[in-house]
Image (spheres, coloured by chain):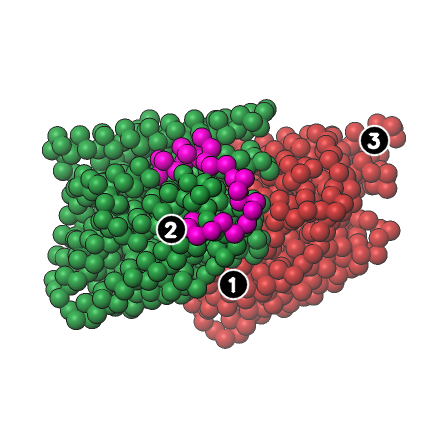
Chain colours: A red, B green
Amino acid sequence: MSLGTFLVMRHELLLIAAALLVLMAEIFWNPDKRRYISLFSVILFGIITIVGFLPSPIGSLFGSMYVTSGTRLLMKNILNIGALLVFIQSVTWLKKEENSEKISEYFILLISTLVGMNFMISAGHFLMFYIGIELATIPIAALAAFDRFKNKSAEAGIKLILSSALSSGILLYGLSLIYGTTGTFYFNEVAALFDNDNLQILGFIFFFTGMAFKISIVPFHLWTADVYEGSPVNITSYLSVISKGAAVFILIIILFTVFPVIITTWQKTIYVTAILTMTIGNLFAIRQQNLKRFLAFSSISQAGYILLGFIGGNQLGMASVIYYILVYIFSNLGAFGVVIAISNATGKENMDDYNGLYHTNPKLSLIMTLALFSLAGIPPVAGFFGKFFLFTAAAQKGYYLLVLIAVLNTIISLYYYLLVVKAMFINKGETPIEKFRSDFPTRFALGICVAGIVVTGFASIIFEVIKNLSFGV
Amino acid sequence: MDILTLFVVIPVLTITGILFLKDTRHVRLVSAFGMGLQLLLAAVLVFLYLSARHAGNTAEMLFIKDYLWFKSLNIHYAVGVDGISVAMIALTSLVLFAGVFASWEVEYLRKEFFISLILLSSGVFGFFISIDLFTMFLFYELAVIPMYLLIGIWGTGPKEYSAMKLTLMLMGGSALLLVGLLGIYFNSSPDGNLLTFNILEISKVVIPLPAQRLFFPLTFVGFGVLGALFPFHTWSPDGHASAPTAVSMLHAGVLMKLGGYGAFRVAIFLMPEAASELSWIFIILTSISVIYGAFGAIAQKDLKYINAYSSVSHCGLVLFAVLMMNKTAMDGAILQMISHGLITALFFALIGMLYGRTHTRMINEMGGLMKVIPFLSVCYVIAGLASLGLPGLSGFVAEMTIFVGAFQHPELFYRIVTILAVSSIVITAVYILRVVAILLLGPTTNEHFEHFTDARWFEKISVVTLIGSVAAIGLAPFWLSTMIGTSLQPIVDRIIALNPF
């Protein structure tokens, strides 16, 4: 094994190096130079994101505990783009007085979670997968409690760590059953030894439940809204986009490669959970006033639509899931970006506060509208294409009823997305948010999101590339 | 760039132009210029189309352009027109042109108003030129969404409620439609060849009957919601009543026709066997639309509600005729779409102008307007007469053709419903004449009315454009009828070949 083979792990190695560099900057830079840490981290991460797209060797390491392939690299790159956006969006918030001491911690913790996600996505062995998932979760709990003087934030941290500990326990129990019946943890060996044994199916169900916690699929979603509301907005957006995306990615890989034998079982599971997730997420979102909670429930329902790409077990399904996550990153971060900008400028996070926003801040309102329309799947923005492909993937295998339920759910979601649009454009605010101008990082991040929302749909090449890298059962 | 794509490009360019205007006073000029250009382009298209047909080009669709978009799903951006879509495009540009002038005096957020209006129209144009189901669906939804803001921001009355109801119901329709279209797509190639969204290619294969039975109702109802199919019509009265003038015009005049056009071009054309099997259900529903809409109009006191219910009735007639599935009735259906589109747009324009003066739309609060504003009043009478089917105006030609065609159907059931539907003409006469009598004739009830000024120049442009078109179709229906008829022939041939009576 030469040193060159380690380059297979390029994404992870770069991230670890970045985390260490930020740490060293924190230690060795003078206090007055430390305010450049944000800039330094963002630039560093920007470089990593770009390097990620360079052609990379693929293969496996450590006796195929660690595997990369074109698909997995693509997934990592998509997560990198999202994380980069979150980084840029955080810069303004980190400038605040109370955060000045903790800037490097913020970036180190975020990068650590990303390392965890990358290892998770590259796992070829359940232990590697488990280590990845823990590394991806525990630092987030610390980040959720980042506003340490706010009770809600501390509560969010505790809730997140407790619920993920519980879900990890369930996940491990499922894995132990799988190990007990197959005698191995390697993905390819488990796949070969799996049959419709009851104990194995029980193991699978526990495994799926553990993952359902991470993706916040109903009925395992109860932690989501509280954690999203309590965490700082940047962390909420990271949780709802990057963490969820990573968990979706690895779940689809594992379902398609490790459990193809019991496809009929997990199709039924997904059928039921998809309907529940979409419907309940949507119905709860209707009544939310706090925009973070609102987007939390909306992101639950989005997870339900994403499950439609899983159900067919087809190549188109995987392609549409990956594509949708990409679209979802731009759309949701666009919506969160506006919430962050307004929260930074005024501290307001309620829907009523947005009344009459168009008259004072037309650009922010338009970006918000575009992002929400993309989440709702309205043409001509990218969300429409994303949803269309998800539905096509499910319809390809004949799940027309499920598709019908899903599209009717998009109507419910359109209702509450329009409520925000209505607040901004139609309602008259008594104390509207003053006109303000965001600083450069915020505008830059929003610009990327808007470009992503507009271009990702029309540029068919993106979908084709993803489709070619995807595979079916 | 091909001529059809220009129909989407010009609105987009107009919107871009408006965006960069500093002075909001120039917005309407730019809009009028853009939409005038669009009208001119439509005239050129009609001319080119007719001369191509004259030269002996018998292809089903002309000016076809096809660009591959999403290769793996075989999604294309494909455009092409036949006589029916050319007629619909001409209708849209007429109504839009008149609509821009009818909203000349919009003050509040003027820029945004015209942008939304033109964005909506680009969706409509895109829908009519598409021959690929994917792009068709994309444009269809694009046409619906700006409606929310148009009604919600610039509307009157319970505008937020109406806007939400309208948007959600129409999007609900498109939800059904999406499933229907996916069903068509996955059955578009029973031999295992490449699946396609292209209407012309799908029409060459026969979709398996079980699939048709499943997806025909979804597609038909999906389009039917927009075409005010009973019981999914309830968005229409509220939506029209709350919408600002130009939006009502465009919506009743053109958008509701998307429903009829789609039901005809997609649902019936691609799935004729299921259509013929299930037509009785929908014929009953559309007959209810026709009669219920007419009675609904009698009961209303608000001018816009009257006209909205009358639209339900007349658009129901379109779907009714389409379901008869013979050439005369379908010919009538297309004529009715055009004729009703123009007439109802004219009505809404006039109502908007009256409302701008009287500040009420309640008929019992008005009276004697003929003396103070003769121009608008005469126009209103003309619109009314056209709507109740006076010979010499477009309404007569359309309704006559529909009923003649519908009665041709040999089965008793169809003849009975035709007779029932014909009764709507009488009811239409009741509410139209009643309104004309109360509103225009009689003594002036309110002294404020004495100071009214008659139509201003922009209002005249708007109204005269529409009346001219209505009269043109009424006096010389044959060129339009021929244009539609020749394009209808292959469609009807296919339907009859698959459904021998």
Q: Mark 1 lies on which chain?
A: A
Q: Where is residue B212 in the image (x, y as percent from the top left)?
A: 27, 62
Range drawn in magenta: B440-466
* SS state under label 1: helix
Q: Mark 1 points at which residue?
A: A274
With respect to residue B374, does A417 lie above or below? below
Q: Name the residue under label 2.
A: B256
Task: Name, please, the residue furthest toward the bottom.
Answer: A198
User: CB under 8 Å between callouts 1 and 2?
Assistant: no
Residue B451 in the magenta stretch? The answer is yes
Front in this rendered view, residue A58 or A366: A366
Q: Mark 3 lies on which chain?
A: A
Asked if marks 2 and 3 fall on the same chain, the answer is no
Q: Residue at x 43, y 26 (%)?
A: B33
In this rendering, the label closer to the viewer, 2 or 3: 2
Q: Position of residue A65 (x, y in %)?
A: 57, 51
Q: Which of marks 3 and 1 is nearer the N terminus?
A: 3
Q: Does residue B16 appear in this view?
A: no
For the residues labelled 1 and 2, the Cα–Cα distance comes to 34 Å
Q: Name the residue under label 3.
A: A34
For the residues labelled 2 and 3, the Cα–Cα distance comes to 62 Å
* SS state under label 3: helix
With respect to residue B131, does B10 lie above or below? above
